[in-house]
Image (spheres, helix red, strand yellow):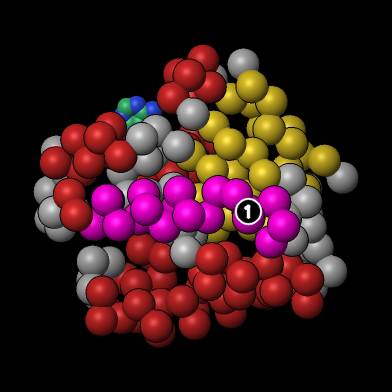
Amino acid sequence: PTTVTVPATGLVLLVGVSGSGKSTFAREHFHPTEVVSSDACRAMVSGDEGDQDATADAFDLLEHWVGIRLRRGLLTVVDATNVQQRARASLVALAKRHHVLVDALVLDVGESTAAARNEARPERDFGAHVVRRQQRDLDRSRRGLRKEGFRRVHVLGPAELAAGVTIVRER
Ligand code: ATP
Ligand code: MG
């Protein structure tokens, strides 16, 4: 299995299109309280985790929540697509303000797999064009990702994900 080393008291950004398996991966590898998801934040500010109109308020809450955890020295995993540079930049800045390390963990299963999985999800009723746009954002991000301030950028493709992943927390 692939070993992924994350900062024990820092921040981990999951990065991947809708359907790439971020929430599933987070559930499998981290404690529920370590995971801060944009869906949970959307639900808390609007009553509906699919409410796109609540996005700005949801990310306000997400950053506040993450900031408190980092100040308290708690490992925090952000479960959001994070495919846009702007979204990652504000979280990298948040980690810097709290003097903690931040890693990116890219789940890269490919657009067709992600879109096919979403087809089977009643709670994701958007079309394949949404995943296509996210994949384009991710592909654009790839080259510069290592220069955005991450300590490590882990990229897990279908083969690594199928073979299994071990998370190591590094103090
Ligand atoms: P979103 O950004 O929309 O929240 P996500 O990246 O969190 O998507 P998940 O909800 O984890 O994606 O997974 C999407 C679907 O794919 C779910 O139905 C899940 O059961 C399935 N899935 C996740 N990981 C795998 C896997 N490794 N193999 C097969 N199916 C998977
Ligand atoms: Mg999810």
State whether residue 156 is above or below residue 65. above
The part of the chain drawn in magenta is 130-148
State whether residue 64 is above or below residue 66. below
Three-letter amino acid code at disc 1?
Answer: Leu
Residue drawn at the location 70% of the way across and 51% of the way down: 146
Residue drawn at the location 84% of the way across and 69% of the way down: 99
The local secondary structure at tag 1 comes to: helix
The answer to which of 101 and 39 lies nearer the viewer is 101
Left of 48 or right of it: where is 57? right
Residue at the disc numbered 1: 145
State whether residue 155 is above or below residue 38. above
Where in the figure is residue 31, as x and y percent of width and height? 57, 45
Where in the figure is residue 160, as x and y percent of width and height? 53, 22
Residue 23 in sight here: no
Where in the figure is residue 150, as x and y percent of width and height? 72, 55
State whether residue 152 is above or below residue 51. above
Residue drawn at the location 26% of the way across and 74% of the way down: 52
Is residue 114 shown in magenta? no
Where in the figure is residue 109, as x and y percent of width and height? 39, 33
- If the image is split into quadrants, where does the C terminus sit? top right
The answer to which of 36 and 88 lies nearer the viewer is 88
